Amino acid sequence: MDDVQISYSSKFLNVAERHIQTTINNFTKWAEQNGFVFSTEKMVSVVFTRKRGVFPNPELFIGRSLIKVVNEVKFLDLIFDQSLRFHHHLKYLKIRSAKALNILKVLANTRWGADRTSLLCLYRALIRSKLDYGSVVYSSACKSLLKILDPVHHQALRLCLEAFRTSPVESLYA
């Protein structure tokens, strides 16, 4: 059902709602013919808009069950909010990346820790892979929100390169 994308202006919300309901009915009919069943408890809908003002929640049904309308939804480990600003997703990503950073902190010990190439490989595998996943989607967020992820990225580079905490970011990138 996530493949349904319909764009209408606010004047034609009832037309959009009817069109989406028709699509849901077609999906349900196809599923019944092919032996599939949709889980109505897991099904939610989100109205994506950046317009201000109150929009009525659509009343969409699958069978006789009303599809719940939510403000944000987690799909493929990306958190989509109504306005597509990705604030909650970026906070969630920072927390997940900070947890992976703890592994680097342990392995970056100067006496017995791993060497620079091993630490950089771990950084790419544990932290940068999390930051890169979905970046095409959440890169539309404003730059001030995207800067939430910079401290984790910079701290990981400092650990891998055994740089001081006060070393400039530009030298880390070099």
Image (spheres, helix red, strand yellow):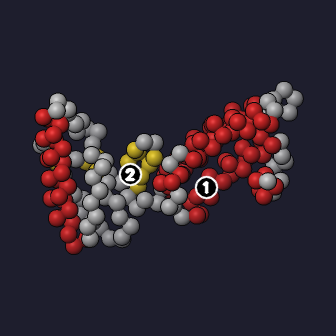
C-alpha distance separating marks 2 and 1: 20 Å
- Is residue 62 shown left or right of residue 103? left
- Is residue 153 shown left or right of residue 129? right
Residue 28 picture quarter:
top left
- Which residue occupies the foreground of this view, 38 or 145? 38
Q: Where's residue 47, x and y in %?
A: 31, 58
Residue 35 visible from this viewpoint: yes
Q: Amino acid at mark 1?
A: Ile
Q: Reply above or below: 18 against 164.
A: below
Residue 56 picture quarter:
bottom left
Q: Where's residue 26, x and y in %?
A: 15, 46
Residue 105 visible from this viewpoint: no
**Residue visible at 35% across and 54% down in the picture:** 71
Q: Which residue is mark 1?
A: 148
**Residue visible at 38% across and 48% down in the picture:** 73
**Residue visible at 32% across and 70% down in the picture:** 53
Q: Reply above or below: 165 against 31.
A: below
- Is residue 173 shown left or right of residue 139? right
Q: Where's residue 116, x and y in %?
A: 80, 37
Secondary structure at badge 2 equals strand
Q: Earlier in the sequence, mark 2 or mark 1?
A: 2
Is there CB contact under 8 Å for labels 2 and 1?
Answer: no
Q: Which residue is mark 2?
A: 72
Q: Amino acid at mark 2?
A: Glu
Q: Reply above or below: 94 against 84.
A: above
Q: Where's residue 147, x and y in %?
A: 62, 58
Q: Which residue appears farthest toward the right when viewing the image?
A: 111
Q: Which residue appears farthest toward the bottom when viewing the image?
A: 11
